[in-house]
């Protein structure tokens, strides 16, 4: 009985993770199309903080500490920071999915752990590529690789 409930939990988490990955691809596309990818040029977070600056005084202080591009606006920072935190949440979901898969693998030899493990590794590769994307100021090849890996994560 316990094994079936763990299998159902694994299945539900896998479906939720797939839907979450789809949402993340849409959010990333929206951030890219709305030109928000360099709204927060420092990675992770925004200007070295957990959240983007909200007031004019905070934005001025952040800009004087770390010179961001002149077109960095508050709305762009929101979109970029939101995308970064969603991608971190997907990494945590995949970690949980791999853990549940290994727990089930002990009981069922046919339990799939290769695909969740590959997606888990791809999510961390994607995170590193996100850092490179910000550091290289949106070079087209890096952005294309970022999108291709994101779609690969969604496909797996």
Image (cartoon, grey):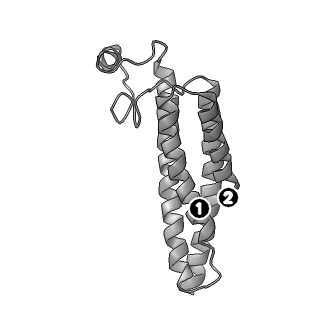
Q: Which residue is at a point 63% across and 29% down the rendered structure image?
A: 140
Q: Observer-nearest residue: 96 or 136?
A: 136
Q: Secondary structure at mark 2?
A: loop
Q: Position of residue 57 (x, y in %)?
A: 30, 14
Q: Secondary structure at mark 1?
A: helix
87 left or right of 7 in image = left
Residue at the spot of label 1 = 118
In this orientation, does residue 86 appear?
no
Q: Observer-nearest residue: 53 or 42?
A: 42
Q: Position of residue 109 (x, y in %)?
A: 61, 85
Quadrant occupied by the N terminus: bottom right
Q: Which residue is at a point 65% across and 61% down the rendered structure image?
A: 15
Q: Which residue is at a point 68% across and 47% down the rendered structure image?
A: 151
Label 1 environment density (alpha carbons within 10 Å; few <14, some 14–19, many ≥20): some
Label 2 environment density (alpha carbons within 10 Å; few <14, some 14–19, many ≥20): few
Residue at the spot of label 2 = 156
Residue 133 higher or lower than 72, as above or below:
below
Residue 147 higher or lower than 1, as above or below:
above
137 left or right of 49 in image = right
Residue 109 higher or lower than 14, as above or below:
below
Q: Are marks 1 and 2 in contact (CB under 8 Å)?
A: yes
Nearer the viewer's eye, disc 1 or disc 2?
Answer: 1
Residue 52 higher or lower than 145, as above or below:
above
Q: Observer-nearest residue: 108 or 134?
A: 134
Q: Earlier in the sequence, mark 1 or mark 2?
A: 1
Q: Position of residue 144 (x, y in %)?
A: 65, 36
Q: Observer-nearest residue: 102 or 3?
A: 102
Q: Position of residue 103 (x, y in %)?
A: 50, 78
134 left or right of 112 in image = left
Residue 105: give its label: none
Q: Which residue is at a point 38% across and 22% down the rendered structure image?
A: 54
In this orientation, does residue 144 appear?
yes
């Amino acid at each position: 009985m316990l094994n079936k409930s763990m299998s159902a939990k694994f299945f539900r988490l896998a479906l939720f993770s797939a839907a979450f990955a789809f949402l993340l691809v849409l959010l990333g596309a929206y951030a890219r199309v709305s030109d928000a990818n360099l709204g927060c040029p420092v990675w992770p977070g925004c200007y070295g903080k957990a959240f983007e600056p909200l007031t004019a005084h905070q934005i001025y202080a952040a800009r004087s500490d770390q010179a961001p591009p002149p077109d960095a606006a508050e709305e762009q920072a929101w979109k970029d920071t939101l995308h970064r935190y969603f991608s971190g949440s997907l990494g945590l979901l995949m970690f949980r999915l791999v853990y549940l898969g290994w727990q089930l693998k002990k009981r069922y030899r046919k339990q799939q752990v290769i695909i969740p493990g590959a997606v888990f590794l791809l999510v961390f590769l994607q995170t590193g590529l996100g850092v490179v994307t910000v550091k290289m100021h949106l070079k087209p090849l890096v952005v294309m690789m970022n999108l291709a890996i994101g779609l690969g994560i969604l496909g797996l």
